[in-house]
Amino acid sequence: MDKSLNLLDLIDKYYYQIEKLFLIEKKAAIEEMRYITTTDIVPSDYFNSGKRMCDTDGKVFYKKFDNIYVIFNDIEKSTQILEYCEKNNLICLYISYIKYSSELLAEILNYFDGKMIEITGDGNYSIIENLDEYLLHKLINDNYKNLFKEIKKIRYDCFFDCCCNVKLYLQQVECYMEECYSKFLSIKETKNIIKYLLLCVFNIFNCKINKLLKKKHIEICFNTRIGCEYGSCKITRFIIGNYLKQDKLIGEIVHKAAHQAQGKK
């Protein structure tokens, strides 16, 4: 059976989670506790495959991956957003946005059997191995018309200029999709399709949230930056006492994806 994913339904699913924040009248009590920082590894573990490599003390692991797409996303002007949220008792909004936007991305990654490797601050590093271009074409073909209809509903004088960006990104996706039918896609074209498609999804998601915030007279807005690069890198695992167990992506293309998202060369 072919995989299918309705992107607008997915956007609404996580938008409603954030909308619920403003429907709760009672504030939850917060119990002060002492925490140990930890990152748990999900059951699908790269280092249980028998192919791991490690140093002599057996506590630094790394595994090399060739020919993968590395995706980086984060929030533009996140420091200012966080400062505003802290001053206005809206920290739950900031935390919820990171949680639900990450879950939105995770569901799209699942469609491609991709994986989110690490959350860093307000951003994520993810990978897609062995990308199935048929699935990429199908995802866009199944969603393009509905995405376009949704964008036409958006007022371009919205609280944030993400709406105008949506139109641009969708035009870019359309341009690359025309190439799909005429010839085999190059790596550059494929990584651009991934980037612009995710930008479309996140900008529609953000615009819904930003309009809600405007109605609530909250003077912040969310904009997601995306970078996507292709090549080879390593996944390494740090285990630090009883405090931290975390996987991280290491490699040139990892930095390139982050720099691309931030508009750097």
Image (cartoon, grey):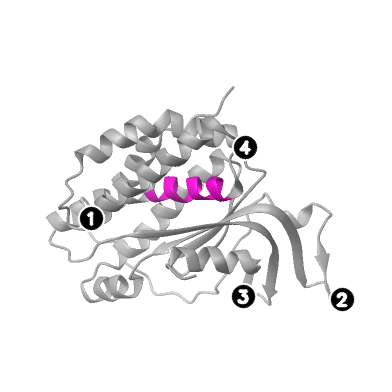
Marker disc for residue 210: 1
Residue, disc 3: 243
Query: Few, some or many C-alpha atoms within 10 Å of disc 2 (few <14, some 14-19, many ≥20)?
Result: few
Most common secondary structure along the magenta stretch: helix
Marker disc for residue 150: none
CA–CA distance in space, label 2 to label 4: 37 Å
Query: Few, some or many C-alpha atoms within 10 Å of disc 3 (few <14, some 14-19, many ≥20)?
Result: few
Q: What is the three-letter code of the residue carrying label 3?
A: Tyr
In the picture, measured across the screen, residue 195 lies left or right of residue 83, that is right
Image vertical order of residue 263 relative to residue 155, above or below: below
Chain-order first, disc 2 or disc 4: 2
* Magenta region, residue range: 188-199
CA–CA distance in space, label 4 to label 1: 34 Å
Q: What is the three-letter code of the residue carrying label 2?
A: Thr
CA–CA distance in space, label 2 to label 1: 51 Å
CA–CA distance in space, label 2 to label 3: 22 Å
Residue at 53% x, 37% y is: 136
Q: Of circles 3 and 1, which is in front?
A: 1
Q: Position of residue 261 (x, y in %)?
A: 45, 63
Q: What is the three-letter code of the residue carrying label 4?
A: Asp
Can residue 194 be seen by looking at this rendering? yes
Residue, disc 4: 132
Residues at marks 2 and 3 touching, judged by CB atoms closer than 8 Å: no
Q: Secondary structure at mark 3?
A: loop
Residue, disc 2: 56
Chain-order first, disc 3 or disc 1: 1
Query: Few, some or many C-alpha atoms within 10 Å of disc 1 (few <14, some 14-19, many ≥20)?
Result: many
Q: Position of residue 72 (x, y in %)?
A: 51, 60
